[in-house]
Amino acid sequence: MKGRVVFWFMLDEKASTGIVLFQLFGQKCQACSPAQFEHAMWYPEEVVKVIGNLFNRIGQEYYGFYSPPVRVDRREGKPQSRHNMEMCQACTEGIAKL
């Protein structure tokens, strides 16, 4: 029900270019493939929200943009069970609550 993504960004002022790196964390499917992590599905409106937050953060950091509030709203979901930390890649790597 929840996906975790971490972004890193930097500006190379000499080359007038920037780089954005990201890691999208997955989860294991207990029934299908309990040995490997698979990426979570993202709804289009969630992608738009996250990319908007990233754009605003880079703009604040490097270009002096106005600092609008970070959007943290989430799409409602109806999980069938509690969060299983052993099946969550972000939890197993210790960065689920950055």
Image: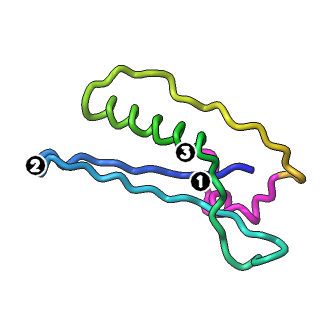
Q: Which of marks 3 and 2 is nearer the N terminus?
A: 2
For disc 1, the marked residue is 95
Label 3's element?
Answer: helix
Amino acid marked by disc 3: Val
- Residue 14: mark in rendering: 2
Q: Which of marks 3 and 1 is nearer the N terminus?
A: 3
Amino acid marked by disc 2: Lys
Residue 27 lies, in percent from the top left, at: 69, 64
Residue 23 lies, in percent from the top left, at: 49, 59
Label 3 or label 1, whichever lies nearer to me, is 3
Task: Answer above or below: position of 8 versus 92.
Answer: above
Estimate the spatial distance between the alpha carbons at disc 1 and disc 2, rounded to whole Å. 33 Å
Q: Quadrant of the C terminus?
A: top right
Task: Examine the image and state in which quarter residue 75 appears.
Answer: top right
Q: What stretch is highlighted in magenta?
A: 83-97
Residue 93 lies, in percent from the top left, at: 61, 62
Color theme of the render: rainbow
Q: Is residue 30 left or right of residue 24?
A: right
Label 1's element?
Answer: loop
Q: Is residue 35 left or right of residue 44?
A: right
Mark 3 neighbour density, 10 Å: few (under 14) some (14–19) many (20 or more): few
Mark 2 neighbour density, 10 Å: few (under 14) some (14–19) many (20 or more): few
Residue 16 lies, in percent from the top left, at: 14, 46
Farthest residue in the left direction? 14
Q: In this view of the protein, which residue sits in the foreground, 94 or 28? A: 28
For disc 3, the marked residue is 47
